[in-house]
Amino acid sequence: MTDDRRLDDLLDAIAQRASAAELARLPLPETYRAAVTRREDVEATLRIPEAERDPGATLHLERVPTPAPAPDEVIVAVMASSINFNTVWSSIFAPLPTFAFLDRLAKEGGWNARHGGDRHVLGSDAAGVVIARGSLVRRWAPGDQVVVHGNWVSGEDPSAYQDAMHAPSQRAWGFETNFGGLADLTVVKASQLMAKAPHLTWVEAASSTLCNATAYRMLISPNGAGLRLGDRVLIWGATGGVGSFAVQQALAAGAEPICVVSRPERVELLRRLGVRHVIDRVEEGYRFLSPDGTTVDAGEVERFADRVRELTGDGVDVVVEHPGRETMPASIASCRSGGKVVTCAATTGAQIPIDSSIATPRSVQIVGSHFANYWENDRANRLLADGVVQPTLTSSYPLDEIAVATRLVRDGGHDGKVGIDCLGAAGSGIEDPVARAAMGGSTITRFADALSGPIDLRVPRSMEVDA
Ligand code: NDP
């Protein structure tokens, strides 16, 4: 039997709601389609300056062998996935080729040896259906509709039980591990699974998980800012992946977001979401670093901080920071005394200038925040399931257009999230249309609608309370 036939049989059984036992009896394809980088491309790519590397040249759609699941793992038929910024980094081998991560993991031996090899299947988001499970898995069974979060961690790490993000074994699935979600199948730990919200399409659910949970840990979780009612929050890139969820969570939590974006359409979209304070950083012409990028322009930093104080009085309680080198001085200067800058990334450069004469007397805290533990992922997924936050999907592409989609995100040409349709047809996956109407109706597609037509002005129930 061919692999295509095996996959068709599995998809037919899923469509017919076959029982867990029936699904488990079907043979798995021996190979599957996946978006990969190739080890043999690394050397030549590293000779090209980072800014000129093209994801289209290094991302390939290939068939790779289907690994057997370890006892604590499941295999998921991936209906949809999404592009995250780590897809961009992986595809251009920056800041380093991800094969270094895979080699380190494979060296541990045992089941982890499967992660090595010359192909890296990328992707840190997925929504789909469990089709096989390892012998230790009890909570999930074939046929379950799930979303996959990217926090891959060993249950044998004692520190994982305090906060999995501190565990030495913690890795970002599909970035620091193999078998990622940009594929027709993926192999994940059962502890990466959460129930898919039945009112969302596959791609809406898949494209929300990583950024929604990252924003949750940064803003809401006690591991991040622990946001309080009435807090003022500065959010950079407020219509981007992380930002679009941070804004919704801040509004839902009764905080006041001060949003920064770079285009008038983005200002307009945020206003229609209910945001009162938006700064168009391009229109207002901020440039915090000298043209050669070596020195901070203190006058520009103060001009921005003055603008934030004009909107907030004494500055913000919390900053959602991710651009890094270019914005950190302005983030710190915008804080009130005792404020927190929570940072999950440094897209514009990791060598970050910090002016101690501003940060220290004001007791500004800089809190590093990396993705989210299982509990934080689950809470963020619950916000989505309850319609408290909505997906921010603005476009989706079939898996074979992965390079086009990754280029779009690399170039910042997108808003919200860019999804990838894998085995699921575009727009499919809504199990409960009645719940869809109750959980937000057309607000679920408001990010996409904002780009293609009139924006629906209704807001989710939780936001109505705050308005
Ligand atoms: P997006 O590209 O979707 O959004 C980033 C936004 O940042 C853009 O919309 C843009 O908005 C803004 N931006 C870009 N350049 C600048 C600049 N020079 N100054 C100010 N704003 C800028 O990316 P994501 O939101 O998905 O991810 C953001 C970063 O967070 C990435 O580096 C990603 O790798 C990281 N990340 C880290 C995670 C972790 O676990 N540690 C998890 C998720 C993401 P505008 O131009 O409108 O201002």
Image (cartoon, rainbow, N blue to C red):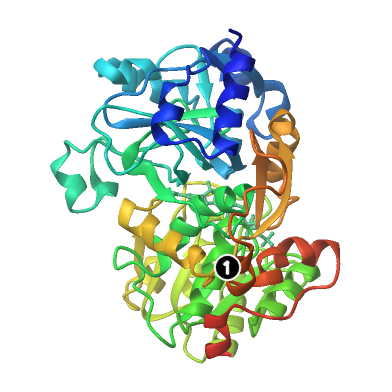
Q: Quickly name the residue at label 1.
A: 435
Measured from the top left, where is residue 360 in percent x and y? 32, 72
Where residue 116 sits, quadrant-wise, is top left
**Which residue is found at the position 42% from the left and 42% from the top?**
150
Q: In which quarter of the image is ligand 1?
A: bottom right
**Which residue is found at the position 53% from the left and 25% from the top?**
121
Q: Say which amino acid is labelled 1.
A: Ala
Residue furthest to the right in view is 453
56 lies left or right of 383: right
63 lies left or right of 380: right
Measured from the top left, where is residue 415 in percent x and y? 70, 57
Measured from the top left, where is residue 182 in percent x and y? 58, 32
**Which residue is found at the position 26% from the left and 48% from the top?**
164
Residue furthest to the left in view is 158
434 lies left or right of 65: right
Measured from the top left, where is residue 106 in percent x and y? 33, 17
Q: Does the residue labelled 1 lie within 8 Å of ligand 1?
A: no
Looking at the image, residue 186 lies above or below residue 304: above
